[in-house]
Image (spheres, grey):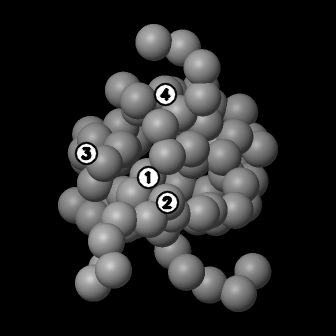
Amino acid sequence: PGGLPRPLLAKDRRGLFPMTFRPEDRWECGVCWTVYDPREGDDVAQVPPGTPFQALPEDWHCPNCDGSKLRFMRIVDDR
């Protein structure tokens, strides 16, 4: 259904906790290493620049290898 996307959860020895992300975070495909940068968007899927990864539709996929959104990993950097 519509509304806000489900929060992603991480797990450590203490249990599950919600993961927090910045809208400007970049994400990398775990299959082909293509990077989704929200500053650029995705021309293939007609996603405009400025669209955070969390705002992408659930059925969005890697424009290079067709990997699912679930295959992407957040890039941790000091931007």
The residue that disc 3 covers is 67
Q: Classify mark 3: residues with Cα within 10 Å, few (<14), some (14-19) or many (20+).
A: some
Whether label 4 touches label 1, CB < 8 Å: no
Whether label 4 touches label 2, CB < 8 Å: no
How far from the left and from the top, in percent, is residue 13?
27, 84
Q: Amino acid at mark 1?
A: Leu
The residue that disc 2 covers is 18
Callout 1: SS: loop
Earlier residue among tags 4 and 1 = 1
Q: Quadrant of residue 3?
A: top right
Measured Cα–Cα span from mark 4 to mark 2: 20 Å
Q: Nearer the viewer, mark 4 or mark 2?
A: 2
Q: Amino acid at mark 4?
A: Pro
Callout 2: SS: strand
The residue that disc 4 covers is 57
Measured Cα–Cα span from mark 3 to mark 1: 18 Å
Measured Cα–Cα span from mark 4 to mark 1: 14 Å
Q: Classify mark 2: residues with Cα within 10 Å, few (<14), some (14-19) or many (20+).
A: few
Whether label 3 touches label 4, CB < 8 Å: no
